[in-house]
Image (cartoon, rainbow, N blue to C red):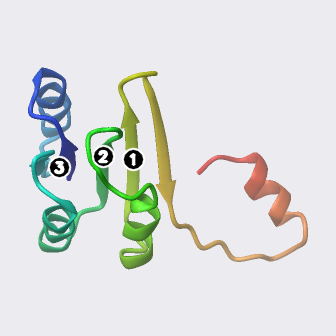
Amino acid sequence: VIWGREDLLSSSVEFILASKKEWEVVSISNKEDIDALILAVETTHADIVIIHQGEHNDPTNLPMQLLQDHPALRVITVCLEDNSMEVYSKQKIMVKQASDLITVIENEP
């Protein structure tokens, strides 16, 4: 699920993602509210949500709220001002030894 502007950049992102035949891409306009986003996540059983930062008057904890309600979800926020992304995912890792904590910190998912 992509939640952002209706512009050329969003259309390009949607086009690139939709080129993967096994992926279903759903785009939600930034004119829609959080409830529309949550409804899309629930009805499509989304694996990933991409949110354009700074496009919505939303609480800054939206990625964490989505992860709390949908633990298997991965949330990616995209900031066009500085060309950055933040990736949020909830992982559960079995600890077998004390050094596992160091391994988790050193390795990115």
Q: From the viewer's perspective, is 50 left or right of 15?
A: right
Residue annotated with mark 1: 76
Question: Of the residues under marks 2 and 3, which one precedes in the sequence?
Answer: 3
Q: Is residue 12 left or right of residue 89?
A: left
* Disc nearer the start of the sequence (3/1): 3
Residue behind mark 2: 51
Residue 31 rendering spot, x and y as whole percentages: 10, 47
Q: Nearer the viewer, mark 2 or mark 3?
A: 2
Residue 40 picture location, percent across and down: 14, 65
What residue occupies the far right of the structure in this picture? 98
Which residue occupies 12% across, 43% down?
A: 21
Q: Are marks 2 and 3 in contact (CB under 8 Å)?
A: no
Q: Is the residue marked by circle 3 packed among few (<14), some (14-19), or many (20+) residues within 10 Å?
A: few
Q: Amino acid at mark 3?
A: Trp
The residue drawn where x is 17% and y is 68% is 35
Distance between mark 3 and mark 1 Cα atoms: 16 Å
Q: Mark 1 against mark 2, which lies toward the viewer?
A: 2
Identity, as a three-letter code, of the amino acid under mark 1: Ile
Q: Which mark is residue 104?
A: none
Disc 1 secondary structure class: strand
Q: Is residue 59 above or below residue 54?
A: below
Q: Is 31 placed above or below 38 here?
A: above
Camera-side residue: 59 or 27? 59
- Tell whether label 1 touches label 3 (CB within 8 Å): no
Q: Callout 2, which amino acid?
A: Ile
Q: Secondary structure at mark 3?
A: loop
CA gap between label 2 and label 3 equals 17 Å
Q: Nearer the viewer, residue 34 or 14?
A: 34
> Would you name the residue on which mark 3 appears?
23
User: Are there few (<14), some (14-19), or many (20+) residues within 10 Å of tag 1?
Assistant: some
